[in-house]
Amino acid sequence: MAQDVRTTSPSRPHPDHLTARIAAFALALGGLALMGWIGFFGFAGVALTPFADIVAGSETTASGNPALEACLAERVGAVDAMRRDGVVSDAQYDTFRARAVSYCRAENPPPL
């Protein structure tokens, strides 16, 4: 009693499945391209590196806001004094300075 075993070729995927696979691949490829673009260029007007402009020293330019300039002079001056006195290290200095500038900018927003 031998069983009749027929060799059949595997069925081909339905055309709709192939379309869905191509669409999924295109979406994944588009997502990867978008992530690469954002990682390289960023968003318009949005700094992806926090405090990037602060570390570069752009906060020392005249802002036209006397309250902001006074706050920056006081807070950044205090951080500079801590660095001079050896209270904070060079690595801590950048962080403390960036936080001081961020605080002053938050407390004294530009006039509308």
Image: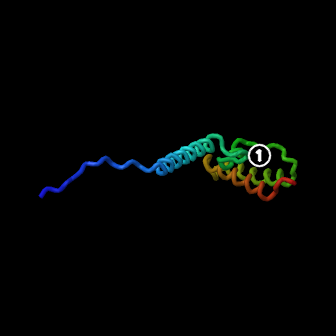
Q: Position of residue 32 (x, y in %)?
A: 55, 45
Task: Return the residue at label 1.
Answer: 59
The residue nearer to you, when weighing 39 against 51, is: 39
Q: Position of residue 13 (x, y in %)?
A: 41, 49
Q: Position of residue 69 (x, y in %)?
A: 83, 50
Q: Is residue 112 left or right of residue 58?
A: right
Residue 4 visible in the current orientation: yes
Q: Position of residue 101 (x, y in %)?
A: 74, 52
Residue at (78% x, 51% y) in the render: 72
Could you say whether the residue bearing mark 1 is in a helix, strand or loop? helix
Q: Is residue 22 left or right of residue 63?
A: left
Quadrant where the C terminus is found in the figure: bottom right
Q: Is residue 79 left or right of residue 2?
A: right
Quadrant for residue 75, please give it: bottom right
How many dots with numbers?
A: 1
**Label 1 Cα neighbours within 10 Å, binned few <14 / some 14-19 / many ≥20:** some
Q: Amino acid at mark 1?
A: Glu
Quadrant where the N terminus is found in the figure: bottom left
The residue nearer to you, when weighing 75 against 40, is: 40
Residue 84 visible in the current orientation: no
